[in-house]
């Protein structure tokens, strides 16, 4: 099906409000970042499937005839809204030898790939021999949705390779996107990849990676915010590693243990997301400095709530404390437990103050950078439009 190599990319995300609560049916507001995961898929004629993941130092390959033996176990889930079953995951773990030594990071990335490859192959009756390289500008396991960007790229590439969606790349265009119904299909398959990596994802991360921009997400309903103000955000990576899957499971346990205490906290986080959305709309309507204290206060309140539900970390407390000494407000973003925090900057925040905050954060061993928000979702790239750094990765593996 695949006639020539294709290169595609999907963005990471930052959650402004609603992480974790969104897993329990509350609203979240999320923005696509200008940090992306890139995937190149090439047709191959050696009867093998190769996946190379330079970010996690993994390169694996399998004969398609061996993969074919697993197809029947995946053909019962031909509906893309079905979830991976424990039996399917056990079969994949055994096949990939995961009991014998791959780390969690490597194993989840590999399992998500095998799961999507086999499920999409079973559904569309193709078992393509391909080479796939995935490389990301995003730190993995840091709260910026690397798992979703990875799943969205894999779903789009495999659906294209199996002929389930078209390849809309026109020679003269440098970047193109799929039509809406194909984006919807990509998003639904990517959600299944996220299920392998997260256990019980809400779907917000794969939705942002697919659709891009700024979204409200609640119980599977995706609403693109059409008019949003330009927000300046400082991202800080504490470099404390954590796993979304474990943190999401921990919150569930806490809710089961203390429902009367935790449910009001989730309801309050929901109210914060709605309040923030109203403020963003009002800001887009009539820009004014008066809204910033409200946005800052919402960051502070939500950060306390996230500590209450057990996803804080001393490194994240440090980010909040250090930025507060410069008059700035921060909260964790994504699953927490380490990973990244976001700090709101005002349009007129003095660059010297931002620099001073950055230096203090770097002195704590953190890495920080200012980012723009509202990047486009999954898209196909012509080779000539790729940055030299990305081309270098693809040419060297
Ligand atoms: N570029 C990548 N290459 C390989 N695996 C990846 C890549 N990006 C993400 N992953 C997988 O996603 C996992 C991280 O997902 P998660 O814990 O949800 O954190 P986050 O989504 O915040 O980065 C990694 O351990 C890895 O298995
Ligand atoms: C905690 C959660 O709300 C976001 C997780 O984001 P990340 O994997 O930490 O980037 C989980 C989810 O929505 O699936
Ligand atoms: Mg994730």
Image (tube, rainbow, N blue to C red):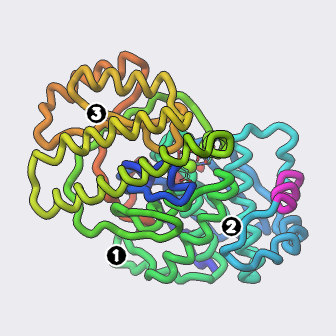
Q: Is mark 1 within 8 Å of ligand 1?
A: no
Percent of width and height locating residue 364: 40, 17
9 with respect to 194 (left or right): left
| Pointer 3 local density, CA inside 10 Å: few below 14, some 14–19, many at least 20 | many
Mark 3 lies on residue: 329
- The quarter of the picture where residue 330 lies is top left
| Pointer 2 local density, CA inside 10 Å: few below 14, some 14–19, many at least 20 | many
Q: Are marks 3 and 2 in contact (CB under 8 Å)?
A: no
Residue 87 highlighted magenta (yes or no): yes
Mark 3 or 2, closer to the camera:
3
Main SS, magenta residues: helix
Q: Which image quadrant: the N terminus?
A: bottom right
Percent of width and height locating residue 252: 64, 46
Q: Work out how far the residue at label 3 is from the one at label 2, CA to CA, in angstroms.
A: 47 Å
Q: Are marks 1 and 3 in contact (CB under 8 Å)?
A: no
Mark 2 lies on residue: 130
123 with respect to 325 (left or right): right
Can residue 380 be seen in the rendering of this structure? no
368 with respect to 337 (left or right): left
Work out whether residue 11 or residue 394 is closer to the camera in this orientation and state it.
11
- The quarter of the picture where residue 68 lies is bottom right
- Point out the tag, 1 or 2, that comes first from the N-terminus: 2
Relative to residue 351, is residue 294 depicted above or below?
below
Q: Work out how far the residue at label 1 is from the one at label 2, CA to CA, in angstroms.
A: 25 Å
Mark 1 lies on residue: 173
Range covered by the magenta-colored residues: 86-94
- Point out the tag, 1 or 3, that comes first from the N-terminus: 1
Q: Secondary structure at mark 1?
A: loop
Percent of width and height locating residue 298: 31, 42
Percent of width and height locating residue 357: 26, 24
Q: Secondary structure at mark 2?
A: strand
């Amino acid at each position: 099906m695949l006639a020539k190599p294709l290169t595609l990319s999907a963005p990471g995300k930052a959650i402004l409000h609603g992480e974790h609560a969104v897993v329990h049916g509350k609203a979240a507001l999320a923005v696509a970042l200008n940090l992306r995961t890139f995937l190149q898929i090439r047709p191959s004629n050696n009867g093998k499937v190769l996946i190379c993941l330079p970010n996690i130092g993994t390169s694996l390959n399998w004969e398609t005839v061996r993969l074919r033996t697993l197809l029947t176990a995946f053909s019962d889930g031909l509906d893309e809204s079905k979830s991976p079953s424990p039996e399917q995951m056990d079969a994949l773990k055994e096949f990939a030898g995961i009991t014998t030594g791959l780390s969690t990071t490597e194993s989840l990335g590999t399992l998500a790939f095998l799961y999507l490859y086999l499920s999409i192959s079973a559904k569309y009756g193709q078992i393509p021999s391909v080479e796939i390289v995935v490389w990301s500008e995003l730190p993995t396991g840091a709260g910026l949705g690397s798992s979703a960007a990875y799943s969205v790229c894999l779903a789009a590439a495999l659906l294209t390779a199996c002929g389930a969606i078209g390849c809309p790349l026109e020679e003269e265009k440098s970047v193109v996107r799929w039509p809406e119904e194909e984006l919807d299909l990509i998003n639904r398959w990517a959600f299944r990849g996220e299920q392998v990596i997260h256990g019980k994802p809400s779907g917000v991360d794969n939705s942002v990676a697919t659709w891009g921009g700024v979204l409200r997400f609640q119980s599977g309903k995706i609403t693109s915010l059409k008019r949003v103000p330009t927000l300046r955000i400082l991202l800080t990576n504490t470099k404390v590693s954590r796993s979304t899957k474990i943190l999401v499971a921990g919150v569930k346990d806490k809710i089961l243990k203390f429902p009367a205490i935790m449910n009001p906290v989730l309801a309050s986080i929901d109210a914060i997301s709605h309040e923030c959305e109203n403020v963003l709309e009002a800001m887009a309507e009539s820009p004014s400095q008066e809204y910033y204290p409200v946005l800052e206060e919402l960051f502070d309140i939500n950060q306390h709530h996230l500590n209450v539900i057990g996803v804080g970390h001393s490194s994240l407390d440090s980010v909040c404390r250090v930025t507060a000494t410069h008059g700035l407000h921060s909260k964790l973003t994504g699953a927490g437990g380490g990973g990244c925090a976001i700090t709101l900057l005002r349009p007129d925040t003095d660059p010297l103050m931002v620099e001073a905050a950055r230096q203090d954060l770097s002195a704590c061993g953190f890495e920080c950078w200012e980012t723009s928000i509202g990047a486009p979702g999954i898209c196909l790239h012509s080779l000539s439009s790729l940055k030299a750094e990305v081309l270098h990765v693809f040419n060297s593996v």
